[in-house]
Amino acid sequence: MQKLLLLADEAIALGALDGGLSGVYAYPGTPSTEITEYIQQSKEASEKNVHCKWSTNEKTAMEAAVGLSFVGKRAMVCMKHVGLNVAADPFMNSAVTGINGGLIILSADDPSMHSSQNEQDSRYYGQFAQIPILEPSNQQEAYDMAYEGLELSERLGRPIMLRITTRLAHSRSGVERRPIKAQNELSYPKDPKQFILLPAIARKRYADLITSQVLFQESSEKSKFNILKEGSNKKIGIIACGIAYNYLIENINATADCSVLKIGQYPLPRKQIEKMMSECDSILVIEEGYPLVEESLKGFTGKALNIHGRLDGTLPRQGELNPDLVAKALGIESKSDTIIPPVVKMRPPALCMGCGHRDMYEALSTVIKEYPKGRIFGDIGCYTLGALPPFGAVDSCLDMGASITMAKGAADGGLHPAVAVIGDSTFTHSGITGLLDAVNEKSPITVIISDNETTAMTGGQDSAGTGKIEAICMGIGVEKEHIRVFVPLKKNFEEMTKIIREEIEYEGVSVIIPRRECLQTLKRKKK
């Protein structure tokens, strides 16, 4: 079969397509974005009419994917780890309803927070929902798990979580394709009440989910992604999960005679773990993210063991792992403990020169200085960089959409002025309901929707609100005369400060829309 050089994100996309995928649903979020983009750019996907449009947020994406599964088609929904928080309601309930067509829920975690607010571990969500989890260690496994995961989902009758991390998502390796499967035909659930979660039905469905745990466990015990290699050295047994297995094999000379259990499918393979625990004096757990496996071992039967990993400080409690950290945990000398020259040290990101957000912040910062008690509540997007020099203009950044609701809460407590800064894509993602709360209470807040007509932070994907922002605001109930639009350019500085000042003084909900297309998407259009 054809062999390709692919990112793990691309391998997952191709694996799902080759596995009979009929639709992918997603909201852009690093490090998951390239999965949907690969499918959008695929000639094969286009010819087969595979759905690949962006969703407004992760919750709508999750629900649409369940809808595609409802009619018997194979579906995938993709998001980053914090996006799974947004999709949590339908995600949890999809475990109870089960599936009709195969359903993969891809969650891309971001240890070390390269582009995220936290480094939560999605495996806990999978465990919380009590569904099987797949965790690839390399690009070929990423392809294989996507390819086989859709069928596994149908065989087990539940959605499957596929968990990756930034380091795997954005690195390349050779991937061998497998025979292409046809898409499923349209079909409906055998039980017409399967997806109706009224309490009486939900109780039965949940009982089925609990009963299915035995099947999930059996599948994990037999999985080709869980491999136990027995060694002669019984002083220590090593459990390595997902991408962390790569950091172990970088130090293979020091561990060649140790028993190693490579884990790529959950629930944990109890029989293999119990065998290792019965034979080894101690266990080292190497896993990216939280100490899920390490904690789980505490409840396994067997003789008392010394269990080492992130909990006891053998490995650091936070941040990404790497071969050097694993070497240190194994008690061997690090291979690349070198000093990084200042010229290549990490430098903080900055707004592009000429970006409309810059001109907006210059005007806003000028006006807010007139109000020493005023505060600016930020949101998730390029404009969050307004918190950094030279602007220092943002006082908070909690989650998608929180700028408006935090400003409202602060105004409820007597703050004036309370200003929210949010982007167009983030506004349609999670800001609309907060604005409705503010309108319903006539809260004295000023909402700046900085509209660059794209989802810029993740690469310039389509924004759900393009051409609709004013209509949405009016539909919610914002007074037309207090929806103000201007072009953020230096030549319009006086006009911008005048509008911001006037709307801050209005004792109600004001919406200001600085609108200018993102420079990067404009450049691509010109090319």
Image (cartoon, helix red, strand yellow):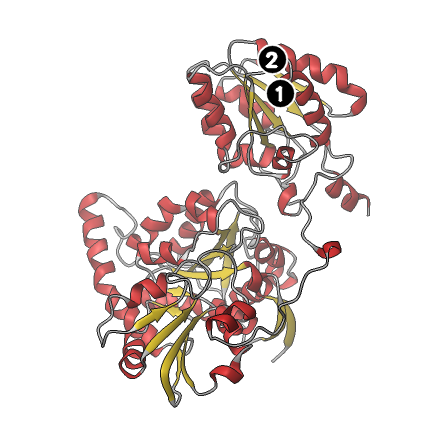
User: Which label number is shown at residue 503?
Assistant: 2
Residue type, label 1: Ile
Q: Is residue 9 above or below residue 261?
A: above
Q: Is residue 12 left or right of residue 498?
A: left
Residue 502 makes an appearance in the image: yes
Residue 501 x/y as whole percent: 64, 12
355 vs 330, left or right, is right
- Which residue is rendered at x = 54% and y = 51% of the image? 113
Q: In terms of secondary structure, where does tag 1 sit?
A: strand
Residue 400, image x, y percentages = 50, 37
Q: Amino acid at mark 2?
A: Glu
Q: Residue at x 52, y 9 (%)?
A: 507
Q: Would you say residue 181 is visible in this rendering? A: no
Q: Residues within 10 Å of mark 2 (few under 14, many from 20)?
A: many
Crowding near the residue tagged with mark 1, few <14, some 14–19, many ≥20 C-alpha atoms within 10 Å: many
Judging depth in this view, the residue of 245 and 343 nearest the camera is: 343
The secondary element bearing badge 2 is classed as helix
Q: CA distance from mark 2 to mark 1?
A: 8 Å
Q: Residue furthest bottom?
A: 232
The answer to whether mark 2 and mark 1 are in CB contact below 8 A is yes
Q: Position of residue 517 (x, y in %)?
A: 72, 34
> Disc 1 designates what residue?
512
